[in-house]
Amino acid sequence: MTTWITVCDTCKREGWETRGMEKTDGEAFAELIEAAAAGAGNVRTRRQSCLMGCKHGCNVAIQAAGKLAYTLGDFDPGAEAAAAVVEYAAKHAASATGQVPYREWPQAVKGHFVTRHPPLPGDAGDGGGDGDGEP
């Protein structure tokens, strides 16, 4: 099953305007994640303008149908963080529930988890029925 990494491409870390960057921190992070995810099997990427986690920029969401979903944030947009996000997403894709044991988390994602969401009722794998919210 495919796991999606949704990258906020409008994130701007503190001091962004004084650093003279042509791109937002989110755009830079998205490019690094997209490059790291190239050929990553069951991991795909997409961009979203604003994940509404501005106090935690740079933000990403890790999601797949029928699995736990996560929001991670407060990343410096660098290659090490991008590679760690993709590595975590690959482990999420390989997990039946989306839960990845802590001991398997890449070091560069530890301390960056902001939220965890259960699968929507009716999503595959949750025993929730046909998708109408009723079991």
Image: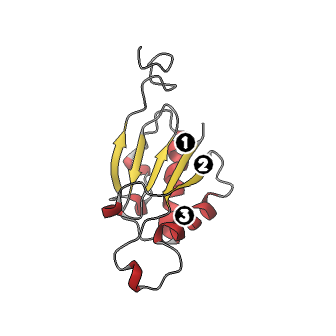
Relative vertical location of residue 122 with respect to residue 69 in this rendering, above or below: above
Q: Disc 2 designates what residue? A: 43
Q: Nearer the viewer, residue 101 or 134?
A: 134
Relative vertical location of residue 103 with respect to residue 59 in this rendering, above or below: above
* Residue found at x 30% / y 63%: 55
Chain-order first, disc 3 or disc 2: 3
> Label 1 sits on what residue type?
Ala
Neighbourhood count class around disc 3 (C-alpha, 10 Å): few under 14, some 14–19, many 20 upward: many
Determine whether the residue tagged by mark 3 lies in a helix, strand or loop. Answer: helix
Q: Quadrant of residue 69?
A: top left
Q: Give x and y (percent) for residue 38.
A: 67, 58
Chain-order first, disc 2 or disc 1: 2
> Label 3 sits on what residue type?
Ala
- Tell me whether the residue at label 3 lies in contact with that at label 2, contact meaning CB atoms closer than 8 angstroms: no
Q: Nearer the viewer, residue 11 or 5?
A: 11
- Tell me whether the residue at label 2 lies in contact with that at label 1, contact meaning CB atoms closer than 8 angstroms: yes
* Residue found at x 43% / y 85%: 19
Q: Disc 3 designates what residue? A: 30
Relative vertical location of residue 133 with respect to residue 28 in this rendering, above or below: above
Quadrant in which the C terminus is drawn:
top left
Q: Disc 1 designates what residue? A: 93
Quadrant in which the N terminus is drawn:
top right
How many angstroms separate mark 2 from mark 1 (CA)? 7 Å
Q: Give x and y (percent) for residue 113.
A: 35, 53
